[in-house]
Structure formats: structure tokens, C-alpha cells
Image: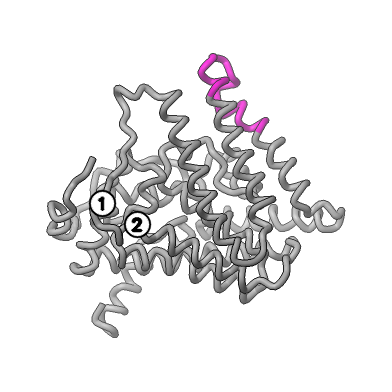
Amino acid sequence: MKEPQETKVEQKNPPLKKEPQEEKDHLPLGGFTFSYYFIFKVIIVLAWHYLLDTLGLHTADFKFYSFVLAHSLLKIIQFNYLKSSLDKKLYVHSLASDVILCYMLTTYGLWIGPIFGLVPLIQSISITIMEYTRYKFFEDTTKVDYVVHISEKISDYTLQPMVALNFALIGYSTTAFHPPRAVHFLGYLLMFLVMDIFFGTTHIISHKNHWLWKKHLIHHKYKREDLDTFANFYAELLDGALMNLAVIILPGIVTLYFHLPPFFMCDLLMSALYTHHKYPDKQAHALWFWEWDVIDIILGRSRISTFHRHHHNFPNEHWSAFGIISNDKVFEKIYEVLQKTMGV
């Protein structure tokens, strides 16, 4: 598996020609893309959570058990009504994986103080174990590979510690747990919007700037068909720092400034981890506000964590992480302005 990085980092920027569009998925954009559909979902989810506030049900226990019930029923449809033995086994594995992650959110996610820094480590390890067991026990391993790229530079493994440190600082800066309310859903959306804008901006810069591209190219060893959770943390030091800025630091500032429940960061991190996952299609992409994801599943829309996956086969498209800003021209314009004003 070891490959000297030098064999690839000298490559030039990817060609600007458009790849064949028929290779892409054709699910209509859902997730967080601004549209009438987006507004529709905001109204539905907000109204539902205001109802929960009124009834006194906006609690960790209710959110956990309602999540389990909803996904228990939904996955029966996703796994072909459990017609075969394999469908039943995959159903159990998928549901167990989601339930464990949701339980973690409603327990470890409520921690306060520096110990909160352990949460992303626990989360990442758990998702990786669930993904690998899915591959090992239910996949034909003679036909499908589980790709793990290994870097010889210790500095290329610093993204996970960076994320953990930021979570620890968020936990340290949180003096008390803030019980979630319906209005916090707007803060949750703001976190994702901030992440998407800054991720998309730093991302297109890392492709257009030749020096940064040589560093970002390391991450692009993973093609879409090879993506797994290890790809999330396979990055050169500076490239990892830029990702940490967009994915964790800026949403963390939003969390602290608006006094949002810190465990929203756990939900955001999980959605980010599933952008690089081998089997994301039938897993939950949101935990606390799981209704947002379920609406996409029921209506057949693309989901929170599916937008970025296309980018690993179409490297000059899909700049943002979640598709809140799905129009690539927005980021191309931002890059043009930065290039003219700052020489980026």
C-alpha cells in the first residue's frame, strides 16, 4: 500500500475539460441546496421542532427513540423489504451502526469541558469499524478493495489531532450545557452554511493554486470508488490545516458565538465524515435533526453527504462540501476576486 508521495505531487493541475456527464448520479439536489425545496424543508423541520418544544419533547431521549423508530421502518424499504437473507443482515448492520452513533451523540456529545475533545476520536473510530465490518462480512472482497493509503510523513496524520484539539477548546469554552430548542435549527443550518462557503473557497484555491495543488493532490489519490473513512484524514499538513479551518474552526466559532449546543458539532462532523465513506447511501447523514435527512430519503433527493463525493472523479466540479452553494460559478467568481485583489 505504501506509495512515495513524490511520484504524484509533481503532477500538473487537473485538465479543465468536462468529464462525461452521464457518469454522474442524477438524483435532484436535496441536502442543503438553496431552492424552494430547501425552504420547504426548513419550514417543515422548524414547525416540527416548535411542536416538540410546546409538548416538552425536545429532549435527548425523545430524539434518540424517534430516530430509532423512524430509521427502523425506513430501512425496511431501503433494504428491499428484507426479502433475502443478505437484505436482513445488511438491515441489522446498518441500523445498529446508526443507533450506536445516535446514542453516542445523545451521551458523549453532551460532555462539557476538555474531555469533549475525545468525541471526534470516538466518532471516527466507530464509523471506521462499522464501515470495515460492512466490507469484511458482506462484500465480495475478491472484487472490491478497501483502500488505505499510507503516507511516510508523520505530519500528514495531524488532521485528526487538530480536530480533537478544536473540540477540546469548544468544550473548555462552554460553561454550561444549553438545552436545544427549535430555533437552534437555524443555527445548525448556519454552521453548515459557514462550513460550505469557506470549504468551497479554500477548496477551489487548493486546486487553482499550483503550489497548494501539489499538496492537495495527495488527498486526491482517493477516487470516488475508493472512498472510505480513511480518506477523510489522508492529507498533507497544510492542506489538512485548511480543511480544519473550514470544517471545524469556523463552525465552532458559530457554535460558541450563538450559544448553540456543542453536540451540534458532532452532528456536523459525522455528516462530513460520510462525504468520504464506502457505504453512505443507506446510513443516516444527520442525527439530532434527523428529519432533514429522512425527508431527502423519502422524496428521493440527494442527501447531505453525497454532494462532495462526485468531486473525487470530477476534480474541477462540486467545490463545496454539502451543496448549500451548489453552483460552482459562485466559487469560481470568489477565486477570481481573490486572485485579482490578493494574488491568490
Q: Which residues are magenta?
A: 72-89
Q: Is residue 204 left or right of residue 174?
A: left
Q: Please rate how many residues cluster around mark 1, counting C-alpha atoms within 10 Å: few if below 14, some from 14 to 19, many from 20.
A: some
By secondary structure, the bulk of the magenta-drawn segment is best described as helix
At 26% across and 51% down in the image, what residue appears? 151
At 81% across and 58% down in the image, what residue appears? 53
- Callouts 1 and 2 close, C-beta under 8 Å: yes
Name the image quarter holding the N terminus. top left
Q: Position of residue 276 (x, y in %)?
A: 40, 47
Q: Is residue 16 left or right of residue 40?
A: left
Q: Is residue 35 visible?
A: yes
Q: Which mark is residue 157?
A: 2
Question: Mark 1 is on which residue type?
Answer: Ser
Chain-order first, disc 1 or disc 2: 1
Does 308 appear in magenta? Answer: no
Q: Which mark is residue 188?
A: none
Q: Nearer the viewer, residue 64 or 69?
A: 64
Q: Residue furthest top?
A: 84
Q: Nearer the viewer, residue 290 or 26?
A: 290
Q: Which residue is mark 1?
A: 151
